[in-house]
Amino acid sequence: MRIGIDCRTILNPDAGERAGVGHYTYHLVRHLIEHDQQNEYVLFFDYRMAREGTQEFTQPNVKIKFFPFSSYGKFLPFAYSHMLVSAALLKERLNVFHAPANVFPLVYPKKTIITVHDLAIFKHPEWFPSQIFSTRLLVPRSLKRARHIIAVSQSTKCDLQDIFSVPSRKITVIPEAVDTKSLPLIDQDDDVRSVYKLPAKFLLFIGTIEPRKNLLVLFEAWHRLQQMRPEAVKGANLVIAGSLGHRGKDIIATIKQRRLNKSIRFLGYVSHNHKIRLIKAAQGFVFPSLYEGFGLPVLEALQLGTPVITSNTSSLPEVAGSAAILIDPTDVDALAMGMRDLLTKPVITKALIKAGKQQAQKFSWANAAAETLKVYEQIMRPNGKLKGNKRPNKNSAKPSTKKKRRK
């Protein structure tokens, strides 16, 4: 087979830009080309990737291509994203094209597989800026025309079926994984406590500051814990790391208006290496998101041996299993008591650390690449049909929203 993969989301891995979809694309491609020498791979980049940045993908069966005129895409976005990109793909005479970011060019007529990570904008449009072209035309049309869809969680598969009526046979669930090794960057040996002047004890949240991350509830829970159990949080900080997303400034402004004390620290964006060291150093990782297509930060914390509190909604129970404290993300008291446990109950945290490392072993990029290659191979069969994954029954398709009883 001659397999094309859109690698534009990778951006520049030498600079640590591997977040989100770029993280998925980078590791999937690396494992595919490492373990599959039978097929040809054509990897497509644009002007944002330096040519020397593609050297780590060099293999005898790999061809690197840069989309032409990509730097002019901002002036003629439709013509570039759909017509010029499609023409470049057709020129390579691909057997299969993999679009790992939910969509592919509207006019590309050949066999295409897309990976769907997240459908939050369709379930909760109020969390996002308006994206009419994408939500009303591009994504629905891509889902309809794709030969097959890879969903990164059962939760995302259920959303595809519920929102777009995609048949189960057209969807294969292939979970993501994480890589928590430090990158060979200038900050790889930094002592993060010294860099950010952090205390010995702190709880950590990492993620984009946006409505669905549920930070207002997190701050309220921290404030309530300070009132109810001041001895539990004495000398501790709640540390927030991540860049500002949609309405992020409003969230920060609301917190400042409430005059919460100096025990809440905002670090802004942190590099990959600092993120890994912050997670390792934290007493616990707190991620009460309202919706996630997969939940990479939770899996990173589990792999690094940091106890986790996360939500019992969307895909997060799939990632955490029984290895985290699962709470209703709207329940301030449950979140406060979970944070109390991470700060004051070493027996609980020790058990969570052990369970978390075991849970993290269930996810690997080697397995994700192997399962993805199966999809490529099956789509080339004479009938071109895949069975996909069976949809779980109603009792297991959607996680329970009931709280766990706490002592």
Image (cartoon, helix red, strand yellow):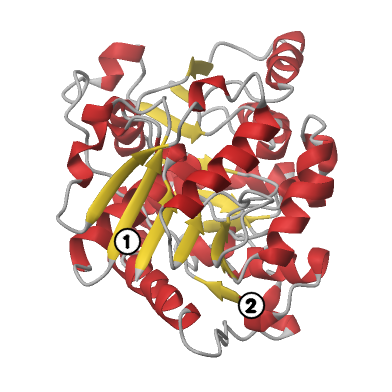
- Where residue 267 is drawn, which disc sits there? none
Quadrant of residue 55 in the image?
top left
Residue occupying image coordinates x 66% and y 15%: 260
Residue occupying image coordinates x 44% and y 63%: 323
Circle 2: residue type: Lys
Quadrant of residue 125 in the image?
top right
The residue that mark 2 highlights is: 170
Q: Nearer the viewer, residue 339 or 248?
A: 248
Evaluate whether residue 362 shows in this view: no
- Where residue 365 is drawn, which disc sits there? 1
- Give how far apart the Cα atoms at labels 1 and 2 are: 22 Å
Q: Position of residue 51 (x, y in %)?
A: 26, 28
Q: Nearer the viewer, residue 89 or 363?
A: 89
Query: Against 214, is 299 above or below?
Result: below
Residue occupying image coordinates x 70% and y 10%: 256
Secondary element at tag 2: helix
In the image, is 86 to the left or to the right of 185? Answer: right
Q: Nearer the viewer, residue 73 or 227?
A: 73
Circle 1: residue type: Trp
Q: Position of residue 379 (x, y in %)?
A: 49, 78
Q: Position of residue 249 (x, y in %)?
A: 70, 14
